[in-house]
Amino acid sequence: MTPQEAYDKVKELGKRIPELELEPAISKDAKYSYYYAFFVIKGRFILGEPAISKNAQYSYWYALDIIEGKLPDFMHNQMILSNDESAKHYVNFIK
């Protein structure tokens, strides 16, 4: 199952379904990990944080919408080191 297929299934059902093991599939993709955290869990999706951390834009949105502050250290460091416009917004956000 692809990350998108897994996300679409849980979005359709409107809740977490751990017994279907969809979270590991979702966690492989930054976009769907962020969407899952924001739209389904409405909170941190720790399993998806490594994938999210590889995308500066989703990392910024995750800090803004989910964490509501500074990212966990491994995500924060990767964000700061990225040469992305989102990193500038993130730095301003956490000040």
Image (tube, rainbow, N blue to C red):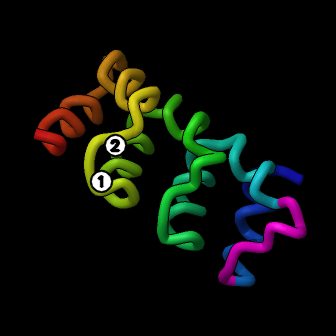
Q: Residue at x 71, y 63 (%)?
A: 7
Residue range (magenta)? 14-21
Q: How many marks?
A: 2
Spot the residue most to the front: 73
List the single residue furthest toward the bottom: 13
**Residue type, mark 2 in image:** Tyr
Circle 2 — which element?
Answer: helix
Mark 2, other Cα within 10 Å: few <14 / some 14–19 / many ≥20: many
Q: Could you say where residue 54 lies in the image, as x and y percent from the top left?
A: 52, 29
Residue at figure coordinates x 34%, y 48% from the top left: 63
5 over 27 or under it: above or below: below
For residue 64, which numbered disc appears in the image?
Answer: 1
Looking at the image, which is closer to me, 2 or 38? 38
Q: Name the residue under label 2.
A: 60
Name the residue: 60% across, 36% down: 51
Quarter holding residue 18: bottom right
The label number, if any, that marks residue 5 in the structure image: none
Could you tell me residue 44's position as x and y percent? Answer: 50, 57
Question: Considering only vertical position in the picture, is 14 above or below 63?
Answer: below
Q: Are marks 1 and 2 in contact (CB under 8 Å)?
A: yes
Question: Could you give the CA–CA distance between mark 1 and mark 2, rounded to whole angstroms?
Answer: 6 Å
Q: Is residue 19 left or right of residue 15?
A: right
Please state the horizontal and vertical placement of residue 85, each as a whole percent of the image: 26, 30
Amino acid, disc 1: Leu
Seen in the image, is 61 located left or right of residue 29? left
Is residue 20 on the magenta stretch?
Answer: yes
Q: Main secondary structure of the magenta part?
A: loop
Mark 1 surroundings within 10 Å by alpha-carbon count, few (fewer than 14), some (14 through 19), many (20 or more): some
Q: In this view, does 14 lie to the left or right of 54?
A: right
Q: What residue is shown at x 59% (from left), y 72% (from top)?
A: 40
